[in-house]
Image: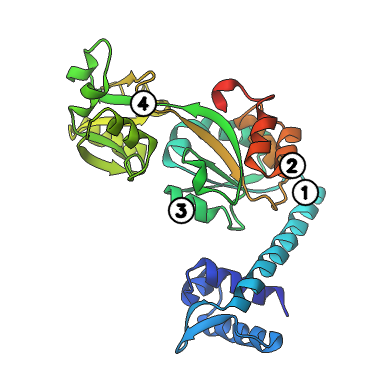
Amino acid sequence: MKLQQLRYLVEIVRRDMNVSAAAARLFTSQPGVSKQIRLLEQELGVDLFQRRGKQFVSLTAAGRAVLREAQEILGRSENIRRLTRDLASPEHGELGIATTHTQAGFVLPPVLREFHRRYPRVRLNLFQGTPQQLADMAGQDDVDLVITTDEAALYPHLVLLPVAGWRYAVFCPAGHPLAQIASLSLADIAAYPLVTYSFAFNGHSALEECFKAAGLTPQLALTAVDTSVLKRYVKEGLGIGLMAADAFDLAQDADLVARDTGTLLPRGTVHVAFAPGRFLRGYVYDFIALLAPHLSRSVVEEARNLREPQAIAALLATTAPAAMI
């Protein structure tokens, strides 16, 4: 049995049984991957995949059991590599961050600038995506951290630590009627077509429930994942924007007004997350502390060992500002 065979197994499952996609990800050929899986099955004496012709359809019961062990073995193998790199060259390496467009464009730049100043020899890899894409990225070798504003339920397999609170603001052109109202109401907001995030009205979001509880059904003019795109269409007059208040840039958005929504709309939490079994290099802990000063290395290590959300929340209740929990 070879580690590479286990990598093929894990990657095929990660790519929804698409052998071609797994081969491309691992920079090899589809026939080569298929051959190594057959050799692994022959050595183990069991079929790992249900097949339809030559196509992999699903894992067998044996395949599911082997997959769990393979993931554990590969995780430990990669941790050994990270550990030795950290000992040999603590200020040289890579840091992979998967995050939302809003965090990447408006929140992280000053943090990444300071991190780069401290660690000029660490290459930063920034991956952006939808909530589901971020959840999928979290298990990949090239992603160390996930920074997300999405519901914690999407990431049950990760250690999730609160970084900061975030709130919605109403974005509208400077001359818009909502820019003139002294105190906004939900009815005022719902009176206009909305331009907002794709996840904001997905059938069960807190924002959607907020309007529903008030007996209001907003009209959605446009949804997208990229805040810069949303702001562009607000400027084009498609509707008013419901976006993270942090996305307002006074220099770039001089023709827009961002109205504080106070307690009208639900607030969210920015989280930093990582796989519980992943070895974090020293500079990763430093990045987390730059992002959230209350998350010192000792706090993150203790939270990582606790694993259970309730225990982590109890720990952070003594360290984080109340607004962040």
Closer to the N terminus: mark 3 or mark 1? Answer: 1
Q: CA distance from mark 3 to mark 4?
A: 26 Å
Residue 53 vertical position relative to residue 284 in the rendered view, above or below: below
Position of the C terminus by quadrant:
top right
Q: Are marks 1 and 2 in contact (CB under 8 Å)?
A: yes
Q: Position of residue 110 (x, y in %)?
A: 54, 29
Mark whose residue sits in front, 3 or 2: 3
Circle number at residue 282 = 2
* 76 left or right of 27 in image: right
Q: Is residue 287 visible?
A: no
Q: Which residue is mark 1?
A: 86
Closer to the N terminus: mark 1 or mark 2? Answer: 1
Of residues 38 and 234, which is closer to you in this image? 38
Q: Which residue is mark 3?
A: 133
Residue drawn at x 35%, y 31% as measured from the top left: 243
Residue 172 vertical position relative to residue 299 in the rendered view, above or below: above
Circle number at residue 265 = 4
How would you rate the neighbour count of disc 2 (Cα within 10 Å): few for under 14, some for 14-19, many for 20 or more?
A: some
